[in-house]
Image: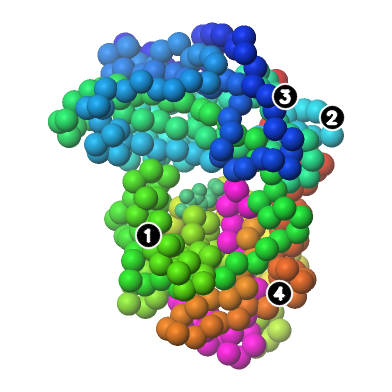
């Protein structure tokens, strides 16, 4: 019988050499880490082993380890926030756990009880509590990761794996206020395709997207707007989900994002925006749709003055306003009615921030580590 993941078996070894903490204004995304890390080994024979929180350390892997050859790797991205009562909170971590299990299952790595990993993450957060920065926009970025650790060049099901979580204190993505981004609509390289794995957070999906980003940067654009197919369907922007707001002829407005058809990463931020806007925007004025739409439609509607705003959505920035899209040698300008963003972009950013920092209670979306 192989053992399930069991948070009650947790063992904690604390560091004797605590790191110096950086002041908030020196924090760089993903560059410095907390004093500890959480690890759980898995073997096909024994199942999940003893969860351990120990001083942050390097991994030692045999050069033949399958993760290094065949990309048996998946990850999650989530954040912990300090509220005004000094509680440490996570935002919809259950969604990250579900997605992590889907990613693991897709590449034949072991699945686990997501609530048990959330309990372990809570304990990890309490151990490294002092690294969760204070202040609006500041948070502790959490990186749950799983790798196949079988030592073999054979391509097959890994019989060993390591699940670990590291944490990096981060500041607001844009400093103070928004910095709208310019996109290059990209059709010569494809991020994800039907039947592929673009809907899973597998490391293998990310390295191939860096070259197209460099190409876009050479032409003065900050991110890729990933298109799919001859139709030019809009899928995602960089590593974020994409949202567009259109005005209809009858005066109603539409918030549109691509449907989860297998080519889209199932963003927790995306899901949260859909739920909050469906609940909170006046139904006689707004339609919220998950539907396919093309760069051609965006270009056409921008020309008619019917494109109102556009933004990317993901854990790192929450929302990232879009100011222009380069497509076939022309620029599609996106209005920024609220100055550095559209009005809805600013509104959803505020709705989500309040829930993340515990200023507002919404369903079970915010969880206090205890
Ligand atoms: C992680 C990610 C997102 C955003 O997901 P969130 O859960 O909102 O952080 C969107 N697209 C891609 C490709 C991603 O990797």
In this rendering, the answer to whether 31 lies above or below 262 is above
Residue placed at 16% from the left, 30% from the top? 153
Q: Which residues are magenta?
A: 294-317
Which numbered disc, 1 or 2, marks the residue that appears first in the sequence? 2
Q: CA distance from mark 2 to mark 3?
A: 14 Å
| Residue most extreme to the right | 85
* Residue in front for this viewpoint, 115 or 11: 11
Residue 269 in the image, given as x and y percentages of width and height: 60, 51
- Mark 4: secondary structure: loop
Residue that carries the numbered disc 4 in the rendered image: 336
Which numbered disc, 4 or 2, marks the residue that appears first in the sequence? 2
* Residue in front for this viewpoint, 54 or 86: 54
Residue that carries the numbered disc 3 in the rendered image: 130
Report crowding for label 3: few under 14, some 14 to 19, many 20 or more residues within 10 A (C-alpha): some
Which numbered disc, 2 or 3, marks the residue that appears first in the sequence? 2
Q: CA distance from mark 4 to mark 2?
A: 35 Å
Q: In terms of image quadrants, where is residue 151?
A: top left
Residue placed at 55% from the left, 82% from the top? 332
Which numbered disc, 4 or 1, marks the residue that appears first in the sequence? 1
Number of the label disc, if any, that sits on residue 85 = 2
Magenta span contains residue 312 = yes
Q: In terms of image quadrants, where is residue 108?
A: top left
- Quadrant including the N terminus: top left
Q: How many marks?
A: 4
In this rendering, the answer to whether 200 lies above or below 324 is above
Question: Which of the two discs, 1 and 3, sits closer to the camera?
Answer: 1
Report crowding for label 1: few under 14, some 14 to 19, many 20 or more residues within 10 A (C-alpha): few
């Amino acid at each position: 019988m192989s053992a399930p993941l069991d948070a009650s078996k947790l063992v904690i070894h604390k560091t004797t050499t605590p790191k110096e903490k950086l002041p908030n204004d020196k924090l760089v995304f993903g560059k410095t880490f907390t004093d500890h890390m959480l690890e759980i080994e898995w073997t096909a024979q024994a199942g999940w082993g003893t969860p351990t929180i120990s001083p942050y350390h390097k991994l030692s892997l045999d050069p033949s380890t399958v993760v290094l050859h065949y990309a048996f790797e998946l990850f999650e991205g989530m954040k912990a926030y300090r509220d005004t009562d000094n509680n440490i909170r996570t935002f919809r971590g259950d969604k990250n756990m579900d997605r992590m299990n889907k990613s693991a299952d897709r590449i034949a790595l072991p699945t686990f009880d997501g609530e048990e990993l959330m309990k372990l993450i809570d304990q990890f957060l309490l151990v490294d509590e002092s690294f969760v920065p204070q202040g609006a926009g500041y948070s502790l970025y959490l990186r749950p990761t799983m790798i196949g650790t079988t030592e073999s060049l054979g391509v097959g099901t890994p019989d060993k794996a390591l699940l670990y979580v590291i944490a990096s204190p981060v500041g607001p993505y844009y400093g103070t206020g928004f910095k709208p981004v310019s996109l290059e609509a990209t059709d010569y390289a494809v991020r994800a395709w039907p039947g592929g794995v673009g809907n899973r957070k597998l490391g293998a999906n990310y390295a191939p997207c860096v070259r197209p980003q460099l190409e876009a940067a050479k032409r003065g654009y900050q991110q890729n707007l990933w298109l799919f197919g001859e139709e030019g369907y809009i899928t995602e922007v960089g590593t974020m989900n994409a949202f567009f707001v259109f005005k209809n002829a009858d005066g109603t407005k539409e918030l549109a994002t691509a449907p989860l058809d297998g080519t889209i990463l199932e963003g927790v931020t995306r899901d949260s925006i859909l739920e909050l806007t469906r609940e909170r925007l006046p139904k006689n004025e707004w339609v919220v749709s998950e539907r396919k739409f093309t760069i051609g439609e965006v270009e056409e509607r921008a020309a008619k003055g019917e494109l109102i705003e556009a933004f990317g959505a993901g854990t790192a920035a929450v929302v990232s306003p879009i100011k222009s899209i380069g497509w076939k040698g022309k620029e599609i300008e996106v209005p920024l009615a609220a100055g550095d963003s559209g009005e809805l972009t600013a509104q959803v950013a505020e709705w989500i921030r309040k829930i993340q920092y515990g200023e507002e209670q919404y369903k079970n979306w915010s969880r206090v580590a205890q």
